[in-house]
Image (tube, rainbow, N blue to C red):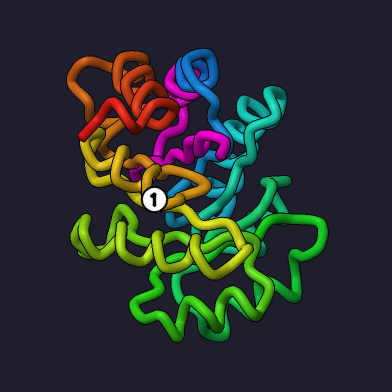
Amino acid sequence: MDAPRLYLITPPISDWAAYPPLLNAAIATCDLACVLLRIAADDEGAKEQIVRALAPVLQKHGVACLVADDPQLAARANADGVHIEGAGPELLSALRSLQPGRIVGVGGLKTRDAAMIAGEAGADYLMFGGSASGEPHAWIVERVAWWAEIFNVPCVGYAHDLGAIGDLVRAGADFIALGDAFFADPRGAGAALRDAFRIASMPETIQ
């Protein structure tokens, strides 16, 4: 089985200027699949400026750039897709408006039924856990293992910290999502991602 790739979730961004060097460091360090931009700006023009500034930094290296919760912004600013919370009408609307040309992922799936509904609706991936959700590590591992054993739609396991990665790899996650574990690591971006990539590639060494 191939090692899972890494998926970064940014803190809420109101000023994009600090992010290109962080993202370039991430790309240079590991097998980065995707970055989910969480936008804190209120003005629509400012939101679009942030995405248009950061998306090309990723896309020129083949890394997907997703936007949180706003399909229209994703399309308008030329992002690669959107991440929606929950398997409700917002997901169905995003699927209709963005597929097949762009990615539509989904998280915030509190029950197994919600996960199956999202998968059957046509989501490109499911995420268990997340930056803003309170699910404990054991719950995330259990859901990843259940999903990976039965279903073909890729799943993302959210790692609260670097020590959580090994369990998620062994459970069968296709992607490992990192939020504060990357962006708030006091050692800096490169060290955090080197560790994350090493653990994801060799989970048998981490117990």
Residue 153 visible? The answer is yes
Q: Is residue 83 left or right of residue 195?
A: right
Q: Position of residue 151 (x, y in %)?
A: 57, 68
Q: Position of residue 38 (x, y in %)?
A: 43, 49
Quadrant of the image for the N terminus?
A: top right
> Residues in magenta?
1-23
Q: 29 above or below 90?
A: above
Residue with the mark numbered 1:
40
Instruction: Give the camera-side residue of 168 and 159.
Output: 168
Residue 13 visible? The answer is no
Res 61 quadrant in image: top right
Q: Is residue 124 left or right of residue 139?
A: right
Q: 29 above or below 23?
A: above
Q: 54 above or below 112?
A: above
| Residue in view at x 42 percent, y 43 percent | 176
Instruction: Give the camera-side residue of 22 and 206.
Output: 206
Instruction: Give the camera-side residue of 47 and 71.
Output: 71
Q: Position of residue 207 (x, y in %)?
A: 20, 35
Q: Is residue 193 magenta?
A: no
The amino acid at mark 1 is Ala
Q: Is residue 14 magenta?
A: yes
Q: Position of residue 147 (x, y in %)?
A: 47, 66
| Residue in view at x 71 percent, y 24 percent | 60
Res 42 quadrant in image: bottom left
Packing grade of label 1 (10 A; few <14, some 14-19, many >=20) is some
